Image (cartoon, grey):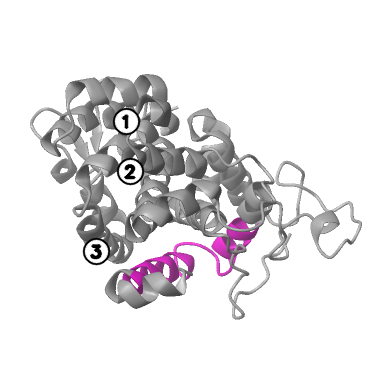
Amino acid sequence: MLPERLTTTEPALAAALVAYVDGVRTHPALPAGLLDACGARIAWLLAGRATGPTAPAAHRDGAASDEPTADEPTSDETAAACLAFAEQFVLDAQALDERTVGRVRDAVGDAGYAVLALGVGLMEGLVRARLAWGLPPLPPPADAPEVPR
Amino acid sequence: MGTVPHVPVPDAARDEAGVITMGPVLEALVPDVAALRATYFGHLAELIARAPDVHELNRIATAETTGCRFCRNIRRQDAMDAGVDEDAVDRVRADGADGFDDPRTHGALALGERLRGYPLGAEEEGPAPEHTALAQQDAPLADAVVLAVTRAVADGKAIVALGLEPDGMPVRVV
């Protein structure tokens, strides 16, 4: 997650960040795998690199696809609502509108919305930090389930 | 956005002036996450305390990006408490990194601007040149700037998304 020099010189900080990220991404207020899916979408938006199944397929391994974006109907309203929120959060949080927020709150409740807002911020921060360090975006954890689309 | 809180705000999260503190809002909603966040912030605060002046200047610049009204107001006093003079506060708001000639401050602010301003689909290879330049002067400071600025961006945006900065009801990020 952090460059090795930081985990060596600041082990307590590095461990605390890993615990924070893991605690958010596995929080029971959100469906399993949802924040990993948001993280993959954010990595694609910011870094132009695919790291998981929610990066548009045309950008994964050169595959062509008409896979839906967050604005299009999908088979999972919760995932679609949260991905739409994540995209707008990254692009311009001030422009989040009541519809986008309301879809998420209807789907995951107040606690889920709070975890999502913190988690998407964490994911965005990690992508930006790793770009500055010259590191690729983190791939989704191996144990992350695929979010239904 | 931000005229109505989007999550419940407990009485304990407001002071007598109506100022909302973010931590108690999270503690009431998701106490486990709030505790993990507080632990990480405690360690990050130790890193920031090693160079409070440049970090406060970067916080001011970040507040302009995230649009957090409270951050824009409160950071001025925090910066002065960290040894930054009023002229420097005005310069960072007006000119960012270009307002500073000394390599350390200029480098830290330039790295902050790079972190906040990555274009969509950056597709850059290797470290950001701004990180490399600052790391050549002070490598621990360069890494601390990365962590502090990305933390500030994340929380500033979360405050906006949670609707915790209604008009006339500022929020404190602790």
**To which residue does mark 1 refer?**
B165
**To which residue does mark 3 refer?**
B43
Range of residues picked out in magenta: A14-40
Residue at point 80%, 62% (across, down): A60
Query: What subunit carries mark 1?
Result: B
Nearer-N-terminus badge (1/2): 2
| Amino acid found under the numbered disc labelled 2 | Arg
Residue at point 66%, 56% (across, down): B125
| Amino acid found under the numbered disc labelled 3 | His
Q: Is residue B90 above or below residue B60?
A: above
Residue B95: x and y in percent read: 40, 22
Q: Are marks 2 and 3 on the same chain?
A: yes
Which circle, 2 or 3, is nearer the viewer? 2
Report helix, strand or loop for mark 3. helix
Q: Nearer the viewer, residue B158 or B42?
A: B42
**To which residue does mark 2 refer?**
B104
The quadrant holding residue B21 is top left
Asked if residue B167 can be seen in this view, the reply is no
Q: CA distance from mark 2 to mark 3?
A: 23 Å
Relative to B78, B162 lies left or right: right
Q: CA distance from mark 1 to mark 3?
A: 26 Å
Residue A128: x and y in percent read: 53, 51
Q: Are marks 1 and 2 on the same chain?
A: yes
Q: Nearer the viewer, residue A105 or A6?
A: A6
Relative to A124, B152 lies left or right: left
Query: What subunit carries mark 3?
Result: B
Q: Residues within 10 Å of mark 3 (few under 14, many from 20)?
A: some
Residue B42: x and y in percent read: 21, 61
Q: Nearer the viewer, residue B1 or B108?
A: B108
